[in-house]
Image (tube, rainbow, N blue to C red):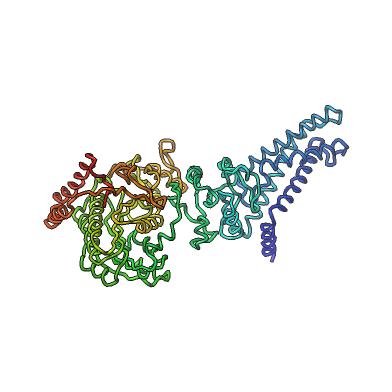
Amino acid sequence: MNQTLVKRIREKIIKTPRFWKRVFMISLDVIALMIALWGSYAIRLSVWTPTITGERLLLAAFAPMVAIPVFIRLGLYRSVIRYLPEAAIWTIIKAMLIATMSWVIVIFLMEMTGQGIVPRSVPFLYFILGTLLIGGMRFAAKWILMSGTGLRRNEKPIFIYGAGPTAAQLARALRGHGNRYVMGLIDDDPTNHGRDIGGYRVFPSSQLPSLIDRYGITEIVLSMSSIPMDKRQAVLGRVTSLGIKVRSLPDISDIVDGRYIVSQIREIEIDELLGRSFVPADANLLDQAIAGKIVMVTGAGGSIGSELCRLIVRRKPAKLILFEASEYALYRIEHELLAAGHHAVVPVLGSVTDAKTVERAIRTHKVQVLYHAAAHKHVPLVEANVLEGIRNNVFGTLTVATTAAAQKVESFVLISSDKAVRPTNVMGATKRWAELVVRQMAIEARDRPDKQVFCAVRFGNVIGSNGSVVPLFKQQIAKGGPVTITDPDMTRYFMAIPEAAELIVQAGALSAGGDVFLLDMGEPVRIGDLAENMIRLAGFDVQDANNPDGGIAIEVIGKRPGEKLFEELFYDRNNAKPTRHPKIMRADATAIANYDIDTWLRKLEQAIGMEDEAQARKILFALISAEQIELGTGTVHQDRIC
């Protein structure tokens, strides 16, 4: 019964508004200072009842009058008692020392006016007793609130970075729920500093290191909607360097769309750390491309393919054909779409190199729009399996594109790669060949009465895709390291999977036939910086010369076969023309390269048939070299694909 009563009292104290808690604490401090002053005189004069005079009463009144403002200024009433760290004793000592010195100045002024003399040991005793009482009351209250019943013992003090409406909503949503307790808000806007928003004090970001020490903070939650887009990267860089866990509240648009709830805190996505600006998709372009149409996606179970499928079903196509060679990947994406209530999906198990299966899928379902995402993309694996890489990426594309042309598919979109630009590896070279195959289909489509559009979309690395460096880094960090990188100065372009899928569909809607669309990937990212940022994002330090004994190490293992130090999206950025979408550019298509791609394909097919890897590789790069020669003479531009 007593335990239940104590629990109710504690719960009532916890739920009491912060304003009244502060009023109560100030009242207790005034009483404590009076007791400390009485005790100082009692000890100095060796009597329990020191003589009370007018001067002593006046000095007693001045003691809390000078002390309380000091306590307020140093934040003694902003701390939440339950989470008061042991380091707070130094703040209390500092506050009491300043209050005592201020009181001594008052004493000195009174003595100068002949108002009486205070024994010199009294201020010293007052400082000691005041510190013991002010600090003792706080730590005793903390012990009472946090012991016994164990009420909310697992709560963790956190700060929310941002002072907008979403941050205030999150703070209210977390009040009394979960194991996080919001200590306050952090904001860069000076006009908000010192204000209370939703009952929470707003602190400047410059005070973060001291606030973390003062309150024992181990986690900061970023309210991304409250942080301007152009400042997010700087904010992320600042907080990840503090050695604490960083999480994020989803953007307000995601909350409105129902993807998250306001109290749902998630891990920081690496694309947020990269600071990419996001342009909302053009709904008209998306609907123009796929709404009400029969759509087929090859490689439907892959990273890009599956995200394309998720996007497509939300735009309400007449039917979605999932074409995939992996049985498990096909089952997984079909099950996901069906579970989400999208029933107009048809799974087709087969390889893009199987012409009969491809033809049957397109013909049976009367496909109108086809996204060709099926490809072998892992550079070292394709480098070690040249024949299979060529067979799948080049001749698989040829099979699908030729069949699409024969079956009068309205729109064909090839998913290409930045590695197709001046390729140094087999994967990149096969992707360039695939672009040339699609170019040939576009040329031939011009002479047919049926309107058919063939185009390619070229972009860089997709964050979180199969074989991407980001999931690998996450796994290595979870195991405690080391994080392995091939070259710290290597740079790569990165894009989030959902954004890539949206831009692919929109680019297809913009195509007039034969285009190569280049997606704006922002600035390239240095791999060494990416590894360091991901380690700090996980709340760890980087083990280096300045920190040899702790944190997670970064190990340089050297470049792998076929890897480039720098990736490119353009042969010449000046030849890229803007489109109606700010993130999509069109390669200059004013001239047509006069390559006899059929002859080259026959030579490559013969080498594949004889399983002559050396000859196949030679032919593969011979065409690339021919393009480089023409590029050097200025007769054709590498990006001109139609």
When asked about the image quadrant of residue 543, the answer is top left
The quadrant of the picture occupied by the N terminus is bottom right
489 relative to 616, above or below: above
Name the residue at 26% across, 49% down.
428
* Image location of residue 581, percent across then percent down: 41, 52
The reply, left or right, for residue 345 in relation to residue 117 is: left
When asked about the image quadrant of residue 523, the answer is top left
Q: Nearer the viewer, residue 443 or 236?
A: 443
* Image location of residue 515, percent across then percent down: 30, 53
Name the residue at 26% across, 51% down.
641
Quick check: can you spot residue 189?
yes
The residue furthest top is 112
Q: Which of 241 and 61 is in front in this view?
A: 241
* Image location of residue 72, percent across then percent down: 70, 43
Quick check: can you spot residue 329?
no
177 relative to 535, above or below: below
Name the residue at 47% across, 45% down.
233
The reply, left or right, for residue 112 in relation to residue 523 is: right
The reply, left or right, for residue 97 in relation to residue 246 is: right
When asked about the image quadrant of residue 626, the answer is top left
Image mark count: 0
* Image location of residue 41, percent across then percent down: 80, 37
